[in-house]
Amino acid sequence: MPNMSVKRNVMPTQDPNVRSKNFDEVALGYTEEQAIDEAKRCLNCKHKPCVGGCPVKIYIPDFIAKVALGQFEEAYDIIAKSSSLPAVCGRVCPQENQCEGKCVRGIKGEAVAIGRLERFVADYHNKNCTKSPVAPPKNGHRVAVIGSGPSGLSCASDLAKRGYEVTIFEALHTAGGVLVYGIPEFRLPKSIVKKEIEGLEALGVEIKTNVVIGKTITVDELMSEHGYEAIFIGSGAGLPKFMGIPGENLKGVFSANEFLTRINLMKAYKDDSDTPVLHAKRVAVVGGGNVAMDAARCARRLGAEVYIVYRRGIEELPARHEEVDHAQEEGIIFKTLTNPVEILAYNNPNDRRDPKNMSVCGMKCVKMELGDPDESGRRKPFVKEGSEHILDVDCVIMSLGTSPNPLIKSTTEGLDTQRWGGIIVNEDGLTSKAGVYAGGDAVTGAATVILAMGAGKTAAEAIDKYLQSK
């Protein structure tokens, strides 16, 4: 019998008072009974609008139908035909704006919890399946993938399954890109990313870390001297943006990128860390996206009182509703309709801190008012007269977005880019340079994991056609 409840099954989570003091995963996952019950809410619509909302086109009603029957491995096989990172996507994809946003059940109630079911199926498979993927016979063609983030992993996976000899070049010492340096452990355990990468290596993909393309070796050299016939650039968008206000160069001011990399990749919160991070008492995170929520929740777990400072209202926050709710439950304070204008330097000689270090002692802010919508459709903020005030903080984390690193552009002849740094591609991911493709944040700027994966899949198909035609 179908489950016609208008409410989805609640995701079990750690208690907020407990989880705000540890880095263990917040969401605990469905039980088998909960997963089957939730799967029975799917109506298996004739036109399958949820599939149209998925950037990698997973056959969603088909895999959910298998879950409803308790056939979890069969469900995984269906997902794996389209997605190379199901355990990741089930956790970090903004399903509410994609597949679940198209769900018919969402018209008069809550959408089917597609993301939670995908996570359940992937976790079940990872726990119970001991077989490694089998590498197919090689077809004699070599492809280089730059970057081991979602777009690079997706592209490499699809090409390896077609028999290509694929090498991934990663600048950092650990593969995974934003999945390991950007997304906190409490949202995406690194053991899951590691298992996905091990599956990729089982397909025959070689991963070379500590290779900075543009410095260690260039794109042109990969093709002319090392025999790669095609290249996919999935180097992400790791160049942080700042406001340009006074005080941004003080001790205690971080980009969210640096702060999260120290926390997630280098485990800087541990007492014996080689790369410690400031354990501040009061932290302001400037910005309102998912990255801002991640940075704020990490700072909270380090014991700080944390403020989200955002120039628009709570309704305009671009972060996922679930992440905002979790942040509020964990005690993070939202200072909306507030904008910083200066970061203040500490200069009290009576304190133990050396005033010559010029540490942060506060942030001067103004209150904002919202006017009419601008060209993007969002209400434009204006400064409220006479609203200047000081927020008492000793650390500021800027989370204002990122852009692609200009290194690859500056060292690759004939590669056209946007003024802001994004690589220009056609609908197949082909750049202005023959045999060179690109996708993910290196093209679009900071976006979502699943959109990057979709770009990687598109490019893999185009690379296959290109090399087969040769």
Image (cartoon, rainbow, N blue to C red):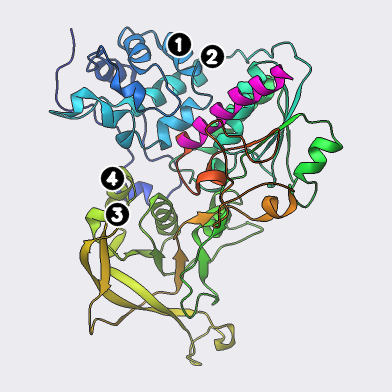
* Residue beneath disc 2: 129
Q: Nearer the viewer, mark 2 or mark 3?
A: 3
| Membership of 462 in magenta stretch | yes
Instruction: Give the residue at the far right of this rendering.
Output: 225
Crowding around mark 4 (Cα neighbors within 10 Å: few <14, some 14 to 19, many 20+) is some
Answer whether labels 4 and 1 touch (C-beta < 8 Å): no
Residue drawn where x is 30% and y is 33% of the image:
12
**Which quarter shows the C terminus?**
top right
**Dot 4 or dot 1, earlier in sequence:** 1
Q: Earlier in the sequence, mark 1 or mark 3?
A: 1
Residue 145, position as x, y percentages in the image: 68, 34
Q: Residue at x 34, y 49 (%)?
A: 319
Circle 4 or circle 3, nearest the eye: 3
The image shows residue 426 at horizontal and vertical percentages of 55, 36
Mark 1 = which residue?
Answer: 73
Circles 1, 2 touching at the beta carbon (< 8 Å) = yes
Residue type marked 3: Leu
Give the magenta-colored segment's residue range: 451-470
Circle 2 Cα neighbour tier, 10 Å, few/some/many (<14 / 14–19 / ≥20): few
Between the C-alphas of marks 1 and 2, the distance is: 9 Å
Q: Quadrant of the N terminus?
A: top left
Q: Which residue is mark 4?
A: 321
Q: Which residue is mark 3?
A: 317
